[in-house]
Amino acid sequence: MSTVMQRCLALTLAQHSKLLLRKRFLSISHQQSAAMSGLLINQPKYAWLKELGLSENNPGVYNGSWGGSGDVITSYCPANNEPIANVTQATMAEYEETVQKCREAWKVWADIPAPKRGEIVRQIGDALRKKIKVLGSLVSLEMGKIYVEGVGEVQEYVDVCDYAVGLSRMIGGPILPSERPGHALIEQWNPVGLVGIITAFNFPVAVCGWNAAIALTCGDVCLWKGAPTTSLTSVAVTRIVAEVLEQNNLPGAICAMTCGGADIGTAMAKDERVDLLSFTGSTHVGKLVAMMVQERFGRKLLELGGNNAIIVFEDADLNLVVPSAVFASVGTAGQRCTTTRRLMLHESLHDTVVERIAKAYKQVRIGDPWDPTTLYGPLHTKQAVEQYLAAIEQAKQQGGTVVCGGKVMDRPGNYVEPTIITGLAHDAPIVHTETFVPILYVLKFKTEEEAFAWNNEVQQGLSSSIFTKDMGRVFRWLGPKGSDCGIVNVNIPTSGAEIGGAFGGEKHTGGGRESGSDSWKQYMRRSTCTINYSKDLPLAQGIKFE
């Protein structure tokens, strides 16, 4: 072959290769463009998402500056399983950088007087108030809970901010009487330092707020890892908080965020620089987290599962019982840690209550969660739908009868029918299993002792409630032989806790307490201080050492 022909052939091959590359590039660009156009955020109906600073691709790291160069995850809407937008998660290097910046930021934050820290928290609450409807809409769109619950969840963060502002002027320890003359005995409370916050999908705003508002007031800095499936909400909330910090010329790493999966969560659990790790999630994962934190003798605050019961006695007001049981079992499609999963009915009114509740179930308005008239939305994921079906099958095999519901709904999204199952033994394996879906197991009891024992026989100890008019029974229920749960109610449902009380439970629920009462103590370390202001040196217990 001549040299000229070789050059012509080489030129032709080069042009052909360039053409193929161009076609491939155009194809990829077209695919990416099509994928982008398929995101809900690019549809006019969801243009409001951009009011929260969200875009097609969102950085999943904030530590004073925005970043993220890890895996890209897509957030999906549970009501139709359509993609909303993307978030780029943190790499381990970015996690390391963020922790270092948090530790540096703490040096600034800890020196600020508590009331002035409270003022910053107040501003965070006000900033959330301004975005409460649009942020509540995002929670509804991304998590799947109905719009009013989404807004209510943001309101919880706002309320805890208000609570924390007052707390900022009240934190303190007692002055104790010393047995030695010329001595003062006091308790000094100081911030622990860096608080790691890992939250679950079902409350992607409120649980972060319970922790962050109190921790910030106490003088801690925070590092938040939300659930991967609600990463857009994590980004949106962090943007609101970051803006407040930046307006006050404070380091953004005071309230940092690293979106990620199990790798980031494991790093936080094992990291000795994380002085307190607050984890909200399943009992199974919580146990693993607890062991990792305990291995380094770290502090942990666990908010895990709940197999919650309502007990209805023969003297109960059924006009309170029916709406309470329906709200607590159907609300958030059974995806609250405080959802009622066991309904214990006295044998004298079992059939009547089941009939009334089943009738109410059939009247629950099911639809798009962002429709203001909807009372019941989808499950969060397809995996939850599979768990729902598996639990119903197990219940049937163990002797249960499906009175209402029991099927996957024929519509887009992760919709299932709210379900009532009767006829199971109180200690049936499925009854003792917390399944995060809208299935209510109805049990029939005879005596108070029996009902109290059934309430306490499950592994979890989060929330519990009785319905009765008998005041003696009320105080037995509240007493040492009554409910062993962290939340013990009378004539109200198991869900819907107020922020002013300490929230949390016993046994496999983890033992942690968040939000109100003296929960702030978990975010601080206590020192007992003895000060000798005399010229003598008396020893305690009257010991003489001469």
Image: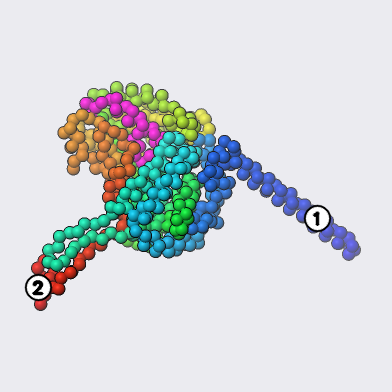
Q: Tell whether position 322 is magenta.
A: yes
Q: Report which residue position mark 1 lands on.
A: 15
Q: Quadrant of residue 496?
A: top left
- Drawn side of residue 49 relative to residue 466, left or right: right
> Residue 461: in sight, yes or no?
no
Identity of the residue drawn at 55% across and 38% down: 46
What type is the residue that disc 1 sits on? Gln
SS type, badge 1: helix
Question: What is the CA distance from the residue labelled 2 to the residue labelled 1?
Answer: 100 Å
Please identify the quadrant where the N terminus is shown.
bottom right
Count of numbered circles on the image: 2
Residue that numbered label 2 is attached to: 544
Q: Nearer the viewer, mark 2 or mark 1?
A: 2
Asked if the residue under mark 1 is in contact with the one under mark 2, i.e. CB atoms within 8 Å, the reply is: no
Q: Secondary structure at mark 2?
A: loop
353 sits left or right of 175 in the view: right
Horizontal and vertical percent position of residue 227: 45, 48
Identify residue type, mark 2.
Lys
Q: Which residues are magenta?
A: 313-341
